[in-house]
């Protein structure tokens, strides 16, 4: 990662949804301003600050592309002799020890004696190897999957997203517009069985692979109850590639309140959708804004900062949206992400509207709906706004707790994401890795449509707006916080995308 100011086409980000990342860039223009912590590493120094473990540099083992025109997503893009399993495992060990935020705690596993895949070794060094569960987020996926989501804005599968409710039932949380599931599944539906196998309180690896395929064309058969009380039906889908639409809803509610359901910060074209939605709110002169981020796992830190600018207006001018703090041996790379005030080109996505000035609402207060699936760049938005004095009223359940971010490292058709930096807002504050606690605690309501009357989180936000306080709680059978498929415990290394990419704040090299 460069320690010089980065252009909008080369930068950082946080965590996200089901599948993909590649030549991404999360705009990181160095920016001054802001008080608080100057960005000193939170980790003790070890002498000269360099890793003295004697592990060879990753460059010694890096795969070599056959030409500068090769993307690296295909096997034939790489010189085969430089991508042997032994070289690849050595590269994995070196890159993790070089880049990981908690590099002192990464175990040293001899890659020449290790018999698993390079991807398994990556998990053994990071999520499974760093003690006390400090690394819940490092992940690895195919480079082609990375490029699909983070450059091309594409999803793969049927387009349904899932959570477990408080009674251990797997439910549909929302469906992507234009996906195979659109019009055939709806929010709140219970998934009873996947390809003939009953769904228990924890998905099996085979069920996860069925829901999150590696390629288009396969068939998924679900036994579904449209509500938990209804009679089950069987429905079959063909997995396909579809376009992601992060702004699922943008509506002006009665009382002149803007409501946006935003599912991710990872789709490059999503910034244009978001800008258009908030421009319409500005034209309508909305009095308040509700951001529904309950299933937003993150993505480009730059898009989160754009939304921060559109909400805060001049409050963010010359201030830090998020300060990135690396390990002690990489302290020269510490840098600040500003509140971006324009549309940008990100990674491999050339934005035809790049440079367009963003609309602003200039709000003193914003309501944010959250669950444990509100993660990473979503949490950065909350923290960044609070850092410049915007009142953020959280309604829902605690966020996922990911104050860390990544840079993508590609080798031999895979994209690796070891956690690398810690984020702090303009005041030098770091949100806790136990999650950001809501102002009003309300369990997710899977019985009502999002954005409509009677939906518990939205109703609570509107009641707080009216009364200036949280309404009395109504504790029911769904009072346990819903857990996402991505957060389910017990899924080991090598399992498919839901584990990592749903929760991202990323920095590209």
Image (tube, rainbow, N blue to C red):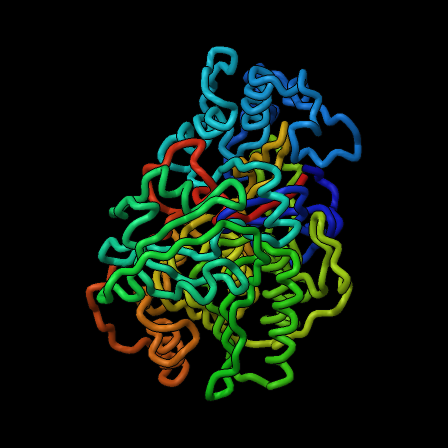
**In the rendering, at what x and y percent does residue 501 appear?**
50, 45
**In the rendering, at what x and y percent does residue 201 appear?**
25, 47
> Is 434 situated above or below 172?
above
Closer to us: 127 or 221: 221
Residue at (79, 35) in percent of width and height:
69
**In the rendering, at what x and y percent does residue 178 appear?**
54, 63
- Quadrant placement of the N terminus: top right
> Is 76 situated above or below 20?
above
270 sits to left or right of 66: left
- The extreme bottom residue here reads 255
Residue at (36, 78) in percent of width and height:
459
80 sits to left or right of 304: right
Residue 482 visible? The answer is no
The picture quadrant where one finds residue 416 is top right
301 sits to left or right of 402: right
Residue at (62, 62) in percent of width and height:
270
Residue 293 visible? The answer is yes
- The extreme right residue here reads 68
- The extreme top residue here reads 113
Residue at (49, 49) in percent of width and height:
239
66 sits to left or right of 232: right
**In the rendering, at what x and y percent does residue 309 appear?**
63, 67
- Quadrant placement of the C terminus: top right
Closer to us: 178 or 205: 178
Marker count (numbered): 0
């Amino acid at each position: 990662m460069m320690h010089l100011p980065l252009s909008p086409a080369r930068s950082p980000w946080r965590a996200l949804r089901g599948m993909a990342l590649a030549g991404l860039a999360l705009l990181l223009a160095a920016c001054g301003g802001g008080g608080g912590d100057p960005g000193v590493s939170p980790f003790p120094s070890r002498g000269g600050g360099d890793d003295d473990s004697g592990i060879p540099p990753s460059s010694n083992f890096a795969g070599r592309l056959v030409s500068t025109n090769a993307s690296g997503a295909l096997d034939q893009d790489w010189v085969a002799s430089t991508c042997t399993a032994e070289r690849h495992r050595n590269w994995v060990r070196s890159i993790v020890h070089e880049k990981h935020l908690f590099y002192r705690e990464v175990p040293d596993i001899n890659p020449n004696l290790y018999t698993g895949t390079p991807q398994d070794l990556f998990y053994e060094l990071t999520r499974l190897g760093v003690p006390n569960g400090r690394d819940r987020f490092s992940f690895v996926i195919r480079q082609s999957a990375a490029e699909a989501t983070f450059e091309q804005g594409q999803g793969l599968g049927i387009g349904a997203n899932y959570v477990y409710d408080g009674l251990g039932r797997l439910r549909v949380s929302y469906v992507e517009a234009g996906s195979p599931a659109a019009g055939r599944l709806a929010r709140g539906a219970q998934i009873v069985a996947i390809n003939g196998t009953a769904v228990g309180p924890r998905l099996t690896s085979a069920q996860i692979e069925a829901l999150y395929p590696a390629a288009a064309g396969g068939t998924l058969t679900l036994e579904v109850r449209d509500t938990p009380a209804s009679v089950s039906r069987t429905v079959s889908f063909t997995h396909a590639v579809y376009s992601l639409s992060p702004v699922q809803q943008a509506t002006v509610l009665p009382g002149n309140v803007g409501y946006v359901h935003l599912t991710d910060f990872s789709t490059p074209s999503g910034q244009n959708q978001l800008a258009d939605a908030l421009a319409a709110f500005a034209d309508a002169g909305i009095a308040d804004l509700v951001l529904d981020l309950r299933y937003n796992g993150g993505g480009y830190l730059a898009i989160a900062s754009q939304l921060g600018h559109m909400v805060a207006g001049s409050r963010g001018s010359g201030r830090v949206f998020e300060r990135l703090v690396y390990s002690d041996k990489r302290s020269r790379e510490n840098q600040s992400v500003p509140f971006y005030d324009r549309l940008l080109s990100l990674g491999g996505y050339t934005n035809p509207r790049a440079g367009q000035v963003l609309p602003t609402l200039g709000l003193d207060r914003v309501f944010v709906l959250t669950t444990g699936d509100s993660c990473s760049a979503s949490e950065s938005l909350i923290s960044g706004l609070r850092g410049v004095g915007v009142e953020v009223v959280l309604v829902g359940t605690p966020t996922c707790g990911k104050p860390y971010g990544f840079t993508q490292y590609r080798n031999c058709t895979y994209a690796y994401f070891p956690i690398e930096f810690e984020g702090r807002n303009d005041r030098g504050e770091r949100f806790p890795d136990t999650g950001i606690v809501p102002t009003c605690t309300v369990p997710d309501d899977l019985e009502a449509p999002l954005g409509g009357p009677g939906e518990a989180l939205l109703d609570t936000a509107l009641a707080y707006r009216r009364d200036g306080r949280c309404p009395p709680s109504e504790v029911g059978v769904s009072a346990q916080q819903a857990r996402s498929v991505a957060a389910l415990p017990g899924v080991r290394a090598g399992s498919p995308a839901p584990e990592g990419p749903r929760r991202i704040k990323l920095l590209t090299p």
